[in-house]
Image: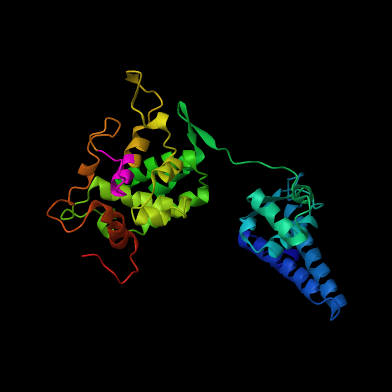
Amino acid sequence: NPLARAGLAPLGGSSALTAIDELTRARNDDDANPSEGFWKAEQGRRSAMEEFRQAIESLAAPADGDAAGSTVVIVVDELDRCRPDYALEVLEVIKHFFTVPRLHFVLGVNLRALEGMVRARYGAGIDARAYLAKFIQVTLDLPDEFADEDQQKRAVLVYLDHLLGEMGIPQHVADPLREQVRIVSRANPVSLRDVETMVSSVSLASVEVLEKPMHVYLSEGEILVMVDLVVSRTVRPDLHPKFLHASVTTSELESYLGATEDVLREESGGQRNPAHDPGIAWRYHTWRYLSRNVRFKEDDPDVPEGISLQFPYFSSRSPREPWDMPMDVHRRWLDLFSFFRAT
């Protein structure tokens, strides 16, 4: 049975990948031993590839009453996250099966990362796109937006909604996270993997914030700070320490949040400003307040009312100050494996 000989009985996703992996390893062994056992290695590689070819052809062959035969699709996902040499060897192996009827390979990859692997292996002067064209016949990009009822919704937000539901993130945390990703993804590149990382980080937060026990008071400001720490660590790791230590500057906030003057201004010429984004303005001025920006004035007409009121447990009777909150939130809710616990 050719399927059994190729290790594909029963044929599943992991079985096919294992077979490809074995072929790649044989190819690598051949490259690593150019003289010793060359012919033996070459014969073994060709035999393995022929076994795999026969297995696939047998699987795709017409069955009883099926004149056309079956189509076989092998999905190779996240190839761009492998070692560059291994990823390119997999492509070379796959190329040998392009002539097998009704066999198709689907690669789930970041093409720019794959092009970088080609240049890393063959030099900066190579035309990486032309090289990959030998293996990739049709390219389909994931859409940036999806139709959601009567409006278009960005893919990262659609995926975020899916993950929040799948992982059971409570609404009092999910809503601020959704709003923060909406804002930050407009001014910064945010990938689907970034969304996975952020939701995973939130799902591992303290039970205190996720389950919200009746005896624990959680202010809106604390949750907003926690969400900002999670998002900045993923999207802008260069700014994360500054958010953590409440030392982020006005210009950094403008870059991170897309907080342009037009977006921040609530009115223009005595009329309501249609470009104004309350969510951006609220976060922008919140972090100006926490970072002790010398120009922050709560009575400024451009500053939303109630910025300081979202941090009620920081008062004149408390030894802590508002700018201590990011580190306090980090230690209590996010840094669960630290021996340090804030008191």
- 252 and 179: which is toward the camera: 252
Residue 280 is left or right of residue 131, and the answer is left
Q: Is residue 202 magenta?
A: no
Where is residue 223 shown, x and y percent of the image? 29, 49
Where is residue 328 shown, x and y percent of the image? 27, 59
Report which quarter residue 282 is drawn in: top left
Report which quarter residue 253 is drawn in: top left
Q: Is residue 290 magenta?
A: yes
Residue 241 is left or right of residue 44, and the answer is left
Q: Range of the magenta residues?
A: 285-297
Residue at left offset 80%, top offset 57%: 96
Give the answer, above or below, for where 301 lies relative to 157.
above
Residue at left offset 72%, top offset 42%: 138
On-image quarter of the N terminus: bottom right
Can residue 167 be seen in this snapshot?
no
Residue at left offset 22%, top offset 43%: 308
Where is residue 99 shown, x and y percent of the image? 82, 52
The extreme bottom residue here reads: 36
Residue 302 is left or right of residue 43, and the answer is left
- 134 and 6: which is toward the camera: 134
The extreme front residue here reads: 294
Can residue 328 be seen in this snapshot?
yes
